[in-house]
Image (cartoon, rainbow, N blue to C red):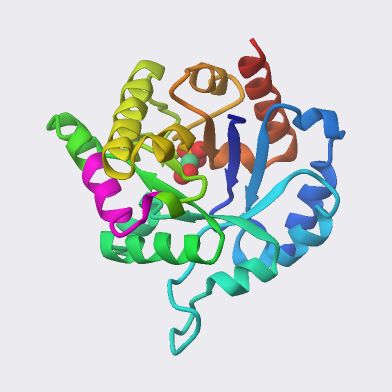
Amino acid sequence: MEPLIAANWKMHKTAAETAAFCADFRPEKAFFEGVEVLICPPFTALGAAKTALAGSPVKLGAQNMHWEKQGAYTGEISAAMLREQGIEYVIIGHSERRHLMGETDEQICRKVNAALENKLNPILCVGETECEREQGVAEEIIENQIYRAYKGLEPDKTGSLVIAYEPVWAIGTGKAALPEDADKAATHIRNCVREMLGSKAANGLRIQYGGSVKADNIGSFVELPSIQGALVGGASLEAESFKALVQAARKAVAN
Ligand code: PGA
């Protein structure tokens, strides 16, 4: 399975800044051999990214979506609106949405189901807070997040699932998880998916690690057989640093 290296830009970059990034981030096709690269800009920059990346293997994703097709939901964006912009992936349940915007497991479940119905690949984010980790309940928290998010999915209609394991204490802190801890969490995640949706879904699942990923530590995550990619915030904002990170990931998986 090709690792999925995804840039989560959060609330960074205007459309003009996105076009400038993409102009710098257009390496030779060979640069992407062995990895799938995804950029998730803010909604308002998706059109600019689509135009600037036309013909490049870099894929486009969104950072959120609403589960309804349309309606009186001021400020929300539907799956069809995203698909029109050439989106293939959508990040769902990022910890910033859970903790800062009060997104619930039930809403996340609706979004995952709606994304799959609309042929978008959901990147489900799960992960424990520092306090939950200290209390020794990290595995239980992750397990609950997965069971609640994937509730109602039919095993043979899941497409290719992606889960990003993002310990909340590692996001934007410069303090990445230890690879052995990420490995343990990823193994647990795959077992949960196996139990819930069967072997086919579990074997096809890509698990990303996210939280303070940089060019100099990505290799230690993607070289693990349990992990197939990374969700990257800060280190994806500059074209040069994201290029270095993608290169480091390729080198690690090639070995
Ligand atoms: P970070 O963010 O790489 O800046 O830690 C990761 C994320 O929030 O997805």
Residue at 66% of width from left, 37% of height from top? 36
Location of residue 155 with respect to 73 vertically, above or below: above
Q: Quadrant of residue 148?
A: bottom left
Give the percent coordinates (x, y) of residue 19.
79, 56
Q: Nearer the viewer, residue 223 or 244?
A: 223
Identity of the residue furthest to the left in this view = 135
Q: Is residue 78 above or below residue 145?
A: below
Q: Residue at x 53, y 20 (%)?
A: 217
Q: Residue furthest bottom?
A: 72
Q: Position of residue 206 (x, y in %)?
A: 49, 36
Q: Residue at x 84, y 35 (%)?
A: 27
**Whether residue 155 is situated above or below residue 245 in the rendered picture:** below
Identify the residue at horizontal 40%, vertical 46% (top origin): 125
Q: Residue furthest top?
A: 255
- Can you say which quadrant of the picture contains the C terminus? top right
- Where does the magenta region start and end? 142-155
In reply to whether residue 145 is colored magenta, the answer given is yes
Whole-percent x and y of residue 238? Answer: 69, 40
Q: Position of residue 212 (x, y in %)?
A: 48, 32
Magenta run includes residue 198: no
